[in-house]
Structures are given as C-alpha cells and as structure tokens.
Image: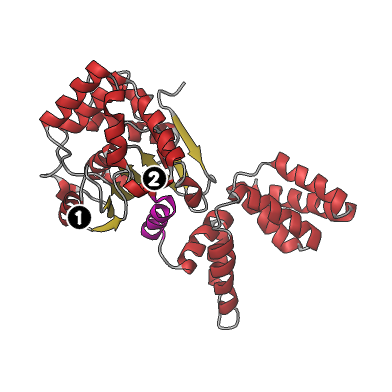
Amino acid sequence: MSKFHYKIEGTPNSPVLIFSNSLGSEMMMWEEVVPHLLPYFRVLRYDNLKRGKLENSLTIADLGQDVLDLADELGIDSFCFCGLSMGGLIGQWLGINAPKRLKKLIISNTGAKIGNDERWNSRIETISLHGMEAIVEDTMIRWFTDKFRAENPKRVEETKAMFLRSDIQAYSNCCEAIRDADFRETLSKVGVETLVITGEEDPVTNVEQAEFLAQNIPNSTLKILKARHLASTELPSEYAQVLIDFIVGDETSVRGMHVRRTVLGNEHVNRANAKKNEFNADFQDFITKYAWGDIWTRPALSKHDKSLITIAMLIALNRATELKMHIRAAFNNGVSKQELKEVFMQAALYCGLPAANDAFHLAEEVFKEME
C-alpha cells in the first residue's frame, strides 16, 4: 500500500502536471482548477499532511523527495509541477535539486523565505494550546478577498472544514519545515523555466516577495492575479488559463496541436504534418485549430467520453478511415476494449447490424496492428 494519499486524473497519453498544496490544505483546494486542465494534462494531486503525521520533524527537502518518490512509484519520469505557498517552497527545492525531472515549474503565492521564526513558533504554540479553531477565521481572511468570502460562503465553509481537519502535529511539523526553509541565496540554481504567480492582495506572500523570486530565478516570469493567498480557489478558470498559457501556449492552434498529439499520438500527427502541402495545409490547420483547439479542449466532457461519442457517430456515418483512427486513439484516452465493445453493441441497436459488424471488423484490424 502506498504511503501517499493521492489522486491522478486524465488520459494516459497526456503529460503529467503535479499539484502541491498550501499549508493546512488538502488536494480538494485544486478541485475547481482541475477540469479546465484535463484536456491538456494528466493531473496528479497529493496530500502532504499524511506524511506529516508520520514524522517528529520535517523539512522541505523531505517533502520534495516525497514528490520524486511518488512520481517514481507511478512510473512518471518527468512532469510539470505547480506548488502553492508551502507547495511553492517544495517547487523551489525541486527546481534546485531535481531540475532534470521537471518540464516546467510554477511556484504560486510563495516566497524564497516565508515569515520568521517568531511567527511560526507562535503559531505552533497557539494551535498546540487551543487547536486549529484558534486560527481558522484569520486564515480565511488571509486566504480570500472580502469579495470572494461574501459571494462564495459555501466554498469558504468547505475550506474552513478542510482546514479544521488538519492534524495538529502534522500541521506543526509542516510549520517547522516552512520556518526552516530559506532559498534566498540559491534561487539562481533553479534550472528549469519557471512561472511565479501571486495575488495582488496576498498578505502572506506579497507581490514584493514574488518579484524577488522572478528577479532571482533564471528564465522566469511573473503573473499577478486579483486574489489573495489561495489564488487557485478564488480564480480557478483564470488560474488554469495562466497555467495552460505557460505550459502549452496561448494560441488556439498551439493548444490544438498539443491536444491532437495527446489523442492521436505523435506518430500519426507527424505523418499528417509530413503530408502537408500547398493544397491541404489550410485544411490541416483548420482541423488543428477548430477541432482540436476549440472543441476537444472544452472541459465539460472528458477526452475518454469524447472518444466514445466520436466513435459512435463515425459508426453511424460509416466513416471507416476516421473510425479506425479514433479506435486507435481511444486507447490514448483511457478507453478499454470492453467499453469499445459496448459502444458497438449499442450501435447495433441504433445504427444497424451492418454498421456494427463493420465496426467490429475494423476494431480487430486495429488490435492486430497494435500488437
């Protein structure tokens, strides 16, 4: 059994994006962000505090090594990483100590050095004596703008409940890890392209601290959002778009090519691109931009479900070439042979026996080609 409490979502052929939480948070803090990202990435979330319960003391290096160990456990060689607050400290450690494992790094609402010994020791003493209830209200004020708290009372209450679930010893251990972390003199060693994000009203890790990070990390950029400390919860759609812009690109055609490759595979797309010429180039660009950049990136349906829907429609339309292509692509979207069979059986009812019969034959051809 894994020592980690984690959740991985998305299609197996997509690049991995790992999220690391803030202090006092669980993986649910990313709940609203993830759907926007699943068309592009395989998203891995995990909780730090389960680890905190197991240790008498803890360092950011320990938590950074946990990320590498979890990635190894899941067979993930390289990944993008986004950490917020304490997660941002973990990201800095990874950028310095394991840059070759990172494709891109996002450190959000964090600092090279967060707070001082007095602040963290006082917090540890307060919760040891009075519990998490003693700091929860102040935490919500620091995490969310007045406007967000007024307009989203349900989400704030959910976040308070999450915070109050924190194990006091685990939380204290993480406070010690943050207290003792200081990357001010080593930021120049971050060896991966980095995006720094902060909230313009963040009272915990303010704009000045974010600017310091961006000025001292090579090949880094800064994005300031209209939020406080938990920018990802306050502005999930905007936050997700910032990540997509940074990791994938801000042009629809670039995003479309990214998704097209995750679904159809590099080999297929490379063959199609090699066949581009003056006559068909506009059509190929049209497919990439509108089919893959506009429709396949819509977050309401998963790529898995879109594959099944697409296959059903291609059966009905008797489009054999496209059907074979999408049967093959379906495996990149996590579709199983059993699910394909069920779609074909459903098609036998509503599209006719000959159409379903052709689909079974085409699928078996694909299976043989993939062996």
Residue receiving disc 1: 214
Q: Amino acid at mark 1?
A: Ala
Q: Which residues are magenta?
A: 235-248
Q: Is residue 341 left or right of residue 13?
A: right
Label 1 to label 2: alpha-carbon separation: 32 Å
Task: Quarter of the image for the C terminus: give it.
Answer: top right
Q: Amino acid at mark 2?
A: Ala
Q: Which mark is residue 239?
A: none
- Few, some or many C-alpha atoms within 10 Å of disc 2 (few <14, some 14-19, many ≥20)? few
Residue receiving disc 2: 150
Give the x, y percent position of residue 170.
30, 22
Any part of residue 202 in sight: yes
Give the x, y percent position of residue 360.
80, 49
Give the residue furthest to the bottom: 278
Find numbered disc 1 in the image and state the secondary structure of the residue it sits on: helix
Give the x, y percent position of residue 81.
35, 45
Say which label, 1 or 2, has the lower sequence index. 2
Find numbered disc 2 in the image and state the secondary structure of the residue it sits on: helix
* x 79%, y 48%: residue: 344
Q: Do labels 1 and 2 touch, CB within 8 Å?
A: no
